[in-house]
Image: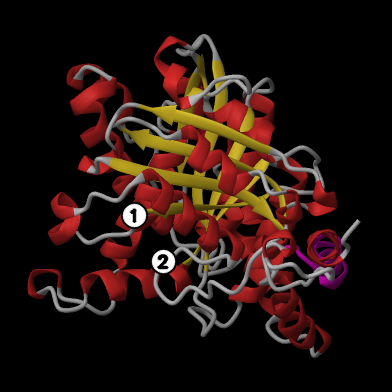
Amino acid sequence: MSTVVIQVGQCGNQVGYELFTRLYEEATTSYLPQSSFTESCFKQFFTNVSSTGNNWANGYLSYGESMKDEIERAIRSVTDLIPEISTVLILMSSAGGTGSGLGCRVTEMVKDIVPGALILNQVVLPFSRGEVAVQGYNTILTLASLYQHSDALFLLHNDKYQQLWKRLSSGIKKLGGGMSFSGMNRLMGSHVAGVILPSHAIPDTTSSSSLSGAVRQTLGSDRIIEELVPSPQYKLLTSYMMPVVSDASREYTHTPWDMLAKYTRQMVLQNSINDEGLMWSKKPESETGSRHRKADINRLVSCVVMSRGTDVALPEIEEKFTVADMYHGRRPRATFAYSAHKFDGLEKAVFGAVNGGLNGAFLEELLSSSWRKLSAKAFLYQYEKFGLDLDGMKDSFRVLEKVNNDYRDVQLNFK
């Protein structure tokens, strides 16, 4: 089964470049023959220099409609050559107009062109301080549209990756430190690659000592989506990686599996991709002796934990991610997988792909601030001139309010 990747907009192509750079580096060391990977992955099949002016409606209704036939032919020129497609990964952002509006239109087209495939949208969310004045509108319209046509949304927050990149690059003269979109994109590419690269699902009855003799079931992108999205009302996913190290210290990093699992879980519980500044007092109630559940840790719907490297210590990893109090309804839904391949040269690495209550935490402020603008009809004319009126905007807001309420229920309703 194959995964087709589509990159839409400037951000989608920049993150896609870093993703394929990482995949290429991994493939040439283990997974695929170099020539095969090069021929199958590095192919740009559609380009247009027109701008959508940071307007979702322009990208979706105007540009998307006028270029629909050309885009469909370009997609079919690839998908028609692949006999079995399990997943389509679409890389895009939500702040501007091309990645957001056109990305949503492309998602709908893919649903018709490859009806049997699952669709995973990797969505880069804007800086909270603002990239464009209408980024709130664009993000709400994007997420509301994708929620109706995509099978899962892999969220990457610019704020979090900027903070992590600043930490990793500080003091390293050749990297420059501070702000670097290429550095942030590389981190994003690594997080996505670590999740979608081949791994083997671990049967429930398998111990770490018998991994080599276990029946190997490949955990592909389609299976990951199925495990992480048990219900269509919960589609927001995030990822975590441990260890978090700079290029300069990578070759000197030798962290044992139990510490990797410990830090990864704490990052998941606090919804943080940074392993510094963690609050270790935040734990499941069963580990603190408290009889009262609190909303200060990430309550999980589901998770997939992948161990990449040598001598996987399965019990230490499973122990950290099967605590009932971590999960909504106290029903653990965790899938474990492994690969003997070293990721990015690291002797050991753990990746967590998570569907949890705090994945939707950003929606409250997004909706609140955007409702205030919409109530004043701020910037509404920019959308109306492309055919999206006030009622259409409100429909998208209501879709996302339902998503916000569902994730808030996961976080607060301790059934």
Give the camera-side residue of 414 and 379: 414
| Callout 1: SS | loop
Residue bounds of the magenta highlight? 386-404
Tell me: 173 left or right of 88: left
Task: Give residue 299's position: percent from left, percent from top.
Answer: 72, 59
C-alpha distance separating marks 1 and 2: 8 Å
Q: Position of residue 208 (x, y in %)?
A: 46, 26
The residue at which mark 2 appears reads as 275
User: Which of marks 2 and 1 precedes in the sequence?
Assistant: 1
Predominant SS of the magenta segment: helix
Answer with the quarter of the image where residue 209 lies: top left
Disc 1: CA contacts within 10 A as few (<14), some (14-19) or many (>=20): many
Residue that carries the numbered disc 1 in the rendered image = 243
The residue sitting at the front extreme is 289
Q: Please, what is the three-letter code of the amino acid marked with disc 1?
A: Pro
Q: Is 140 displayed left or right of 267 in the figure? A: right
Task: Residue at the far right: name it.
Answer: 415
Q: Residue at x 31, y 69 (%)?
A: 165
Hey, what amino acid is under mark 2?
Asp
- Asked whether the viewer can see residue 27, the reply is yes
